[in-house]
Image: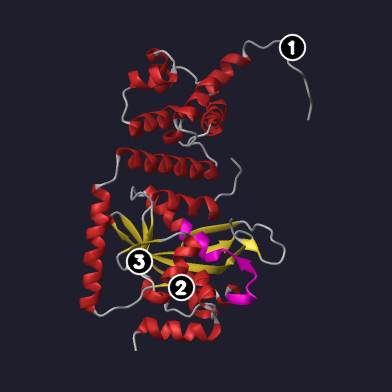
Amino acid sequence: MKKSEKIYKELREKYTDEEIVESFVFNEDLNPAEQKKVEEEFRRIRMERLKNMSESDILAANLIKIKLRIKDYFKRGKFEEKFSFANQLKEYIKITKRSHKEIADNLNIHQTKLSRIINGRENPNIELMYRLEEHSSGQLPAFYWWKLFSKELEHKIRTDLEKKLEEAKKVKGALEIRA
Amino acid sequence: MPLQDKKSGKALHSAIEGVVSSDYIWIGKSKEFNFDWGLERSNEVYKIFLVDKDDEILGLMSLIDYPGEYRIHLNLIEVGKSNRGKSKSVENIAGCLIAFACHIAFDRDYFGFVSLQPKTQLMELYQEKYGFRQYGRLLAVEQESSKALIDKYLNDEEE
């Protein structure tokens, strides 16, 4: 008797098929010749499918990938440069396969402004975040872009000691509170 | 939906991580698992557990990466004895593990493609339960059907 058949028989004594599917995945073991045939047939179908994937299919999968990576980043908590607003915007533009000029035009912002945001010389505004949500067909919601930016901003506020000192010098009459 | 307490219906906070050496010792001793998980060491093996009870593995999954075919193969999934059948206390363990495999398949640029080669008698049920489709003798999810599993089992936030 095949190994998978034996396993199935044993499980079937305790569980229904529905319960087995809810708790197990195991391979049906075939003899080497059968297995080879199954794999060859599968590979043919898979390669055919890959060949026939449209640009839109690839874009949709890449959007899901970006979204999942951003969600994982949110769960990790700490700021990571790779997930700065600018870097994720660059990543987004890359997967759309559109030029910066086209994207600026799509988002109805000046190309110089887009360049400045991508190069981290200008902060993005909420309007841009809403436009990015619309541009990605809702796949990357405005609040994702906001979270990316706010994590970056928090990191900057916490770590930019030079700026902190510079601004502290401008303050007069600070409250005196004794611990 | 994520892991759920069967009695109360409450969502349970869980995590999925790679299995490490000490886990194999626990798995061997626990009597929760029937399959010989030591045989899966050469594959990518993951465990699912409750965050506030991380010394207890609820389910295991062994994956094989086929980069040339842009796919992740579900080689083996086993839910611990205490959570199988009618007496289980935690729901959706296998669903969460499968969804995690889908997540990996998107991350590795495989378009979410995850396959399995189940027994013929069970093929229809895997299709009904998880949305798998037939690719010759194998079943698989990809693209939207793969994303749907992630949304169903791994999503823990409102959008």
Q: Chain of mark 2?
A: B
- Secondary structure, mark 1, is loop
Which residue is identified by label 3? B43
Residue A104 placement (x, y as % from top left): 39, 18
- Per the image, the residue denoted by label 1 is A173
Callout 3: SS: loop
Give the residue number, with chain letter if any, for mark 2. B24
| Image spot of residue A40 (x, y percent) | 21, 65
Left or right of A50? Residue B115 is: right
* The C terminus of chain B, quarter of image: top right
Please indicate, yes or no, whether residue B20 appears anywhere in the rendered image: no
A46, B2: nearer the viewer: A46
Place residue B120 in its image quadrant.
bottom left
Q: Quadrant of residue A120?
A: top left
- Region of the chain picked out in magenta, as a range: B85-99
Q: Position of residue A178 (x, y in %)?
A: 79, 26
Q: Nearer the viewer, mark 2 or mark 1?
A: 2
**Amino acid type indicated by mark 1:** Gly
Secondary structure character of the magenta stretch overall: helix
The residues bearing labels 2 and 1 have C-alpha atoms spaced at a distance of: 63 Å
- Name the spot of residue A67 as percent of width and height, x first: 46, 40
In the rendered structure, the residue with mark 1 lies on which chain? A
Q: Amino acid at mark 3?
A: Asn
State the residue at coordinates (26%, 63%): A42
Q: How many marks?
A: 3
Labels 2, 1: one chain: no
Q: CA distance from mark 2 to mark 3?
A: 13 Å
- Establish if A78 lies above or below A163: below
